Image (cartoon, rainbow, N blue to C red):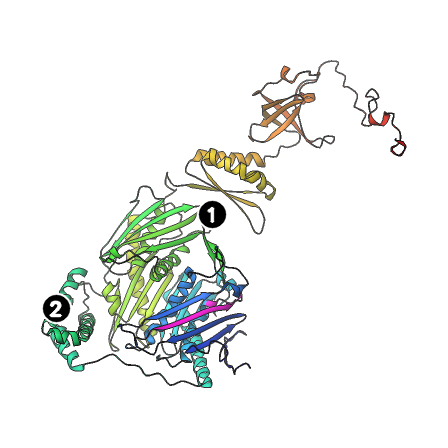
Amino acid sequence: MIPQVFKEVIDLGDGREITIETGKLAKQAHGSVVVTMGKTMLLCTVVSNYKQSDVDFLPLTVDYREKYAAAGRYPGGFFKREARPSTEEILVMRIVDRVLRPLFPKDYHAETQIMIQLMSHDPEVMPDALAGLAASTAIQLSDIPFEAPISEVRVSRINGEFIVNPTFAQLAESDIDMVIGASADSVMMVEGEMDEISEEEMIEAIKVAHEAIKVQCAAQVRLAEAFGKKETREYTPEDTDEELAKVVNDFAYDKCYAIAKQASAKHDRGAAFGEIKEELQAQYSEEELAEKGDLISKYFNKTQKEAVRNLTLEEGIRLDGRKTTDIRPIWCEVDYLPTTHGSAIFTRGETQALATVTLGTSRDANIIDNASHEGEERFYLHYNFPPFSTGEARPLRGTSRREVGHGNLAQRALKGMVPEDCPYTVRVVSEILESNGSSSMATVCAGTMALMDAGVQIKKPVSGIAMGLISDGDRYAVLSDILGDEDHLGDMDFKVTGTEDGITACQMDIKVKGLSYEILVNALKQARDGRLHILSKLTDTIATPAGDVKDHAPKMVTRVIPNEFIGALIGPGGKNIQELQKTTDTTIVINEDPVTEEGIVEILGTGAEGIDAVLARIEAMLFKPQVGSVYEVKVIKILDFGAVVEYKEAPGNEVLLHVSEFAWERVENVTDVLNLGDELDVKYFGIDSRTRKEKVSRKALLPKPEGYVARPPRDDKGKGRDNRGRDNRDRKPREKRD
């Protein structure tokens, strides 16, 4: 018997609907929901242990996976099963986690796992825009403590009209691609890429998204009430000691305030705060520290944070002595690495990124093979954050989710500036060598300069800045170019990238509830001022892209050939193209245009001679002599009945010069007239009607001898051949043979 199903329908206002339902699947999970839009279906479950973990944070895992069966496909790889998450899946996990995590109680430390699975895929529906809605709804159907329902939507804009949760096709035409996460009361997360839009246009897109999210939050509440809203579970809260908190605050606040005001460097400041903490702990016995040491550390950190925040709000002074709008000192350098195709160093304060550029063919494109999306990237960026960049030693566990997310942000910031007609596949790699502040924005700046150094003709240079916000409700301060410590203690951190004409990408996490749009606009405008200041430092170092790629970098030439010549260029088993690559020291890639079916030949080589040789070979292959025209040829092979000649303007393009076309007189031996290597002129007559082969003639260019009499044409029926034709043979009819 099918159990009772509870369902709510969300109207997107344009004829499309989202359905959320529960009661049928995964009933042993603490909360489960199926979210459906079109033929796309997501199953989301949440489970949280009833016992608190022995840690001082929330061990939350958000997992998003796309099942290939959802699209009727097989996974790639030898084992033909889903394995490690793709980059795109990791990015979905991050945008969901960033909205959910702040809404769990601060003292809730039970291990919690949210699993979102794409079970059915509709090509017209982008499933990542539904993941936040699915996760929040599953939590609402559970007894897990959670502040309020949230949701996430994607917003695009086509011809000035905003669209919520667009299709893939609509997104391709849009100048905005933003995912916004929010509760009914507050915007909490913004991430996306834009086509150089203004700050006001960005705010307008956020408002459109928030209105749609309010409707989705209300639907979650209705579904939970219809299903039977569960009582929130009880859990053991953290130990508290208000008297101890006051003692710690009284001891440490003024000292921390004074250190924060000294404008010290990161490590010096950390050491000074550490000394105060040691003085505080020295007042307690070993037994007291064993009993209350964790609380002392907790209250000290809280006091330190309060002192630093108040210093900024009261005096406008920051940890390193800057004013709220000041940018740290910047120095840049390009062409630092001698063997890369492009390189640049960007250093801002105690943050340093070294970016490299590598140029390749379409064969080097990054292949995307997900259940919901297949394609390739001809421009992509990888970001590496080694532990030494923060003065730490820790195990290397492969590429982290953070590295994937930061690299994606920088890639989105820059990719719109790479021209569509760029012949190369371009890979940018950012190595973070120092970090105290936004290394992703340093990556954008270093990446811009490295691209220009490599000779990639980007449309405009792009810079990025990380901003912070401190607010106590009545007062607020927007901080330009935040430090790592300011990122931790602030109420909002947002990263904005763009050209001098507008925003190209952003990533924003808002920790304060009910942030007004007025403050957000002011923060974005202050970010623009800082971004333009940083941009000026980049253009002072390298104003425009290099006119050409470096001498040791590959040059790329693209040639289009008719479809029927693709096979001839490749040769049997790839023989022709492999030999051509070897002799010219080039890389040749041939793709077929999906629309015109023409062959697109990419020729990559460091030497112009090799590229020219390949182009000459292609031109020779495409050479079509004109009837009646005269061409210079070279004898490349001697035969008993003529000579094989090669057009000098099209090497490799051969034709037979028959001995009968050598001269007006009869030629007994070919070598009496022509020898190997001889050069001569011939006239082209097109396709011979009798032999069905191309015909060229030398004698047609020679004067006809005096008294010359042409031989009579041969009788095609065999007469006139000394009675040797088959028709004259004395044979009995087939049926009368013995």
As drawn, which residue projects farthest toward the right?
736
Location of residue 301 with respect to 570 vertically, above or below? below
* Tag nearer the camera, 1 or 2: 2
Q: Quadrant of residue 277?
A: bottom left
Report the front residue among 542 and 18.
18
Residue located beneath label 1 in the image: 363
- Percent of width and height locating residue 493: 30, 67
Segment colored magenta: 109-127
Q: Is residue 392 left or right of residue 7?
A: left
Viewport quadrant of the C terminus: top right
Report the front residue among 87 and 303.
87
Residue at the image point whose x is 46% and y is 66% from the top: 157
Location of residue 628 with respect to 91 vertically, above or below? above
- Percent of width and height locating residue 523: 30, 68
Please check the rendered image and state whether residue 120 is part of the magenta-colored stretch, yes or no: yes
Residue at the image point whose x is 36% and y is 83% from the top: 232
Residue at the image point whose x is 71% and y is 32% from the top: 692
**Amino acid identity at mark 1:** Arg
Report the front residue among 479 and 168.
168
Q: Secondary structure at mark 2?
A: helix
- Percent of width and height locating residue 604: 45, 41
As drawn, which residue projects farthest toward the top?
706
Badge 2 crowding class, 10 Å Cα cut-off, few under 14, some 14 to 19, many 20 or more, is few
Q: Is residue 150 left or right of residue 725?
A: left
Disc 1 versus disc 2: distance between alpha carbons? 58 Å
**Amino acid identity at mark 2:** Glu
Residue located beneath label 2 in the image: 278
Please check the rendered image and state whether residue 704 is part of the magenta-colored stretch, yes or no: no
Does residue 265 appear in this view?
no
Residue at the image point whose x is 85% and y is 27% from the top: 727
The circle on residue 67 is none
